[in-house]
Amino acid sequence: MKDWLKLLAAESAKLRRLAVLRAVALSLLLGPGVMVVILSLVSVDIRTIVASPADIILGSVVLLAAFGGVVLAATMFGREFDLGTARVMLLRGIPRGGFLLAKLAVAILTVTILSLLAALVGVAETLLAGWQPTAAHAAQVVWSVVWVVPLVSFAYVGFTALGAILGRSVAAGMLAGLALFLADFLLTTLGSRIPFGEWLPVTNMFALLGETFGLMLAGNVELSVGVAALHLAGFGAVTVVAGWFLFARGDIHR
C-alpha cells in the first residue's frame, strides 16, 4: 500500500509540472461559461432549447472531461516512451502493473476534480445569466459529475493509454483517443447505426446525461442508465487489460 501511494504521489508530481494540465484545467473551467454566453445570445428563454439550464452545464463539463482525459492520458503514458523514462523506471524495480494503474488513477482523479470545479463555476454562471436553475437541478449536476465523469474518463483514458502503448509515443495515444472521440461522436449524433455502437463511449455517455442528450439517440439505440454505466466500465476495463498485457510483455530495452 505504501509503495502504491508513493507511485500515485510521483505521478501526481510529474503531472503538475506539465503545461498540458493547465491547458485542460483552463478548457474545463472556461467551457461551461462559453456555452452559457453562446446560448444566451441564441435564445432569450433557454428552456425552449433544453429541459433544464443545468443540462447544458453537465453536458459541456462531461464532454470536455472526455476530451481532457484523452489529452492527459496521451501525455502521461506516451511521454514515458518519447523520453525513454519508462525503461529507466522499470529497471529500478517499479512493477509494470503498478506503473500503469498509478497513471490511470491520477489521470481519472485529476479530470474528475477539475470537472467538479467546472460544474460549480458553471452553475454560478447560469445564475448570473438569469437562467435560475432549481437547487435540485444544481445538486444533480454536481452529483452526476462525481460519478459520470470517472466512468467516461475511464473509457477514454484506457483507450488512449492502449494507443500510446501500441505506438510507444504521445502522438499515437493522442491519435487513438481523438479518433475514437471524434468519429464516435459524429457517427452517434448523425444517427448512424454503428456495429456494436451501444458499446462505444458516446452512446453510453449520452444515455447517462439524461433527457436532453438522450434525445440524440432517438432512432439509434436506447439504453438504461445501469446498462450504459456497465458498458462504459466494460469498455474501459477491456482497453486497460489490453494495454497492461501489451506493456507487461513489451521489450523495455527498445
Image (tube, grey):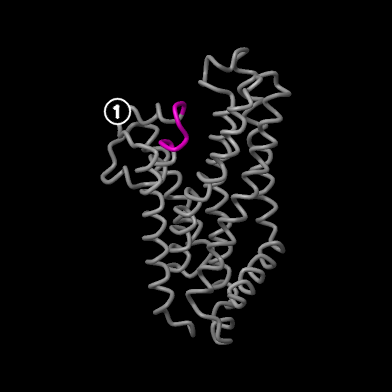
The quadrant holding residue 18 is bottom right
In the rendered image, the vertical position of residue 132 relative to residue 115, given as above or below: above
Disc 1, SS: loop
Residue 227 on image: x %, y %: 34, 43
Which residue shows up at 45% across the image and 31% down it? 210
Q: Residue at x 44, y 38 (%)?
A: 208
Return the residue at label 1. 219
Residue 61: image location, x then y, percent: 58, 39
- Determine the residue positioned at 60% across, 13% down: 45
Residue beneath the point at 67% across and 32% down:
33
Pick the front one: 2 or 80: 2
Estimate the x, y position of residue 132 in percent, counting from the top left.
66, 20
Residue 126 lies, with reference to residue 108, above or below; the image says above
Residue 237 versus residue 247 in the image, above or below: above
Q: Is residue 176 above or below residue 82?
A: above
> Which quarter of the image is occupied by the N terminus?
bottom right
Q: How crowded is mark 1: few (under 14 residues within 10 Å), some or many (20 or more)?
A: few
Q: Give the range drawn in magenta.
A: 206-212
Q: The residue under label 1 is which amino acid type?
A: Gly
Asked if the stretch drawn in magenta spans residue 40, the answer is no
Relative horizontal placement of residue 110, taking residue 220 as reference (left or right): right
Residue 251 figure quarter? bottom left
Q: How many marks?
A: 1
Where residue 216 appears, x then y in whole percent? 40, 29
Please tell me which residue lies in front, 245 or 20.
Answer: 245
Query: Predominant secondary structure in magenta?
Result: helix
Q: Within the image, what quadrant is residue 4 found in?
A: bottom right
- Confirm whether the magenta stretch covers residue 210: yes
